[in-house]
Each structure stands twice: as C-alpha cells, then as structure tokens.
Amino acid sequence: MRALRVLLIIVVIFGGLFVGADRLAVNLAEDKAAEKIRGSQGLDRTPVVSIKGFPFLTQVAGRSIDEVDAELGGIEARAEGRTLRIDKLSAQFHDVALTSDYMSIQSAASATGTARISYADLTKAAGGGVKISYAGQKDGRSQVKISPNVPLLSSLDVTGSLTVDGNTVRLRADKVPTMCKVLPGCESKVRSQTDHEWKLDQLPGNLKLDKVTTQADGISISASGTDVKLPG
C-alpha cells in the first residue's frame, strides 16, 4: 500500500511538471506567433494570440493544433486618399497545421473572423465634413444615415447601404433627394461624399468578407475562409 502511495505521489509530481512545461511552451509559442503576425501585417501593436487544446506539446508532436485565436487592433484600410480604421478584429483558426520544422504555422482548414468599425471612424474615413450614423436594417440591408456637406443644401440627410464584395466594404446612397434633380451638379456632389469603398487587404489568412451588419455603436463585419494561411 505504501509503495502504491509513493507511486501516486511520483505520478502527481511528474504530471504537474508536464503541465507546467506544457503551459510554458504554449505561452512562448503564443508570443512568437503574435510577433510574426504583427510584423507580417504591419500592425501598430502586438495582437493577442491564444492557442487552444491540451496538451499543447502533444499537438505540436502531431504537427496539428486544434485552434488558434487572434485579436488584432489598429488595422487600417486606405482608399481615395483616406484611411478607414478597424477598431478590433477577432479571428479563429481551426485544425491548424505546422510546418515540417515545427517552427511556423502552415495553414488552417477553416477560419472565421469578426471586425468592428465605429461610426466615428467611418465619418473620419468619409472626409469632407460628412457624418455617418446608425440607421438600422431595412429589407435585409444594413443601413446608415449619411449627412453630406453640401453648401447649397441645409440639413441634408440620405440613407445609405453597406455591402461587402471580396475584401471590399462598399457604402452607397440608396438615392439622393429630389431637390438635387433641379440643381446642376448636385447629385454628383452628394454622391462624391456618400459613395465610398474601402479594401481590407490586411485580413489575417486572406479571409473573405461575408456580410456587414449595422448596430447602434458601429458596424460589424463577418469573414470566413477555408485552407487559409496564418503568419506565425
């Protein structure tokens, strides 16, 4: 009985050492992956990377990790000489394969992601004194209220719809006010301030945008992909 008790104590001790070594290894791997993602994506701050599944060392030995999550911030999309800032981007990579030297991530079988953009950042990206705010959902479309800066017209608000295509976010006015029909150049002036598109070419793993949803505090963009690449 005493021998069995000693054996159990030894098993517990070595088990604790293994768990400690496993957690140390995963923390080091997370830090390394975060730095590689920051460098490859040109981010202004280091992302937060979480490697899921236990034990980590056993996953590494099999060159396959259950899940890798990443939270990125400070991403910028440029268009028309202006910048659209993405406040937060969360991505989840599943069935992640390691390279043959076990030092880097090669690919993931599938991935999903969500990006958040505030109306303040949308307004800044539109430029020219234009203001963009929440307008809810209509007929399955995500809508915003756009207040262009047209000197001849006061209190001019139009409704615009947000859509995605590939890795591009598009904003278009649904229609311009009737009064613009009688003012030369009015419609083109309004649309130059209401119609925009921003290419999000810094998505990790080359994820593709699925849809955009307007919410009271900003817009949410979902993305997904299969057989994607993840620097790290």
Image (cartoon, rainbow, N blue to C red):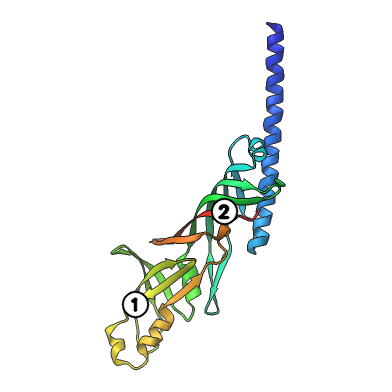
Q: Picture coordinates of residue 160 (x, y %)?
A: 36, 73
In this orientation, which residue lies closer to the viewer: 104 or 79?
104
Query: Which residue type does callout 2 highlight?
Result: Glu
Question: Could you say which quadrant of the image residue 222 lies in?
Answer: bottom left
Question: Which residue is the site of mark 2?
Answer: 71
Q: Is residue 8 above or below residue 202?
A: above
Question: Which residue is the site of mark 1?
Answer: 157
Q: Picture coordinates of residue 50 (x, y %)?
A: 60, 46
Q: Quarter holding the N terminus?
A: top right
- At horizontal 42% and vertical 78% (from top left) the residue drawn is 195
User: For the residues marked 2 and 1, what is the alpha-carbon distance in whole angstroms?
Assistant: 35 Å
- At horizontal 70% and vertical 17% (from top left) the residue drawn is 9
Under tag 1, what secondary structure?
loop
Of labels 2 and 1, the one closer to you? 2
Q: Is residue 23 above or below residue 189?
A: above
What is the residue that sits farthest to the front in this orientation? Answer: 100
Q: Earlier in the sequence, mark 2 or mark 1?
A: 2
- Is residue 112 in view? yes
- At horizontal 35% and vertical 84% (from top left) the residue drawn is 154
Please tell me how crowded label 1 is: few (under 14), some (14-19), or many (20+) other residues with Cα within 10 Å.
some
Under tag 2, what secondary structure?
strand
Q: Is residue 167 above or below residue 106?
A: below
Q: Picture coordinates of residue 225 (x, y %)?
A: 50, 55
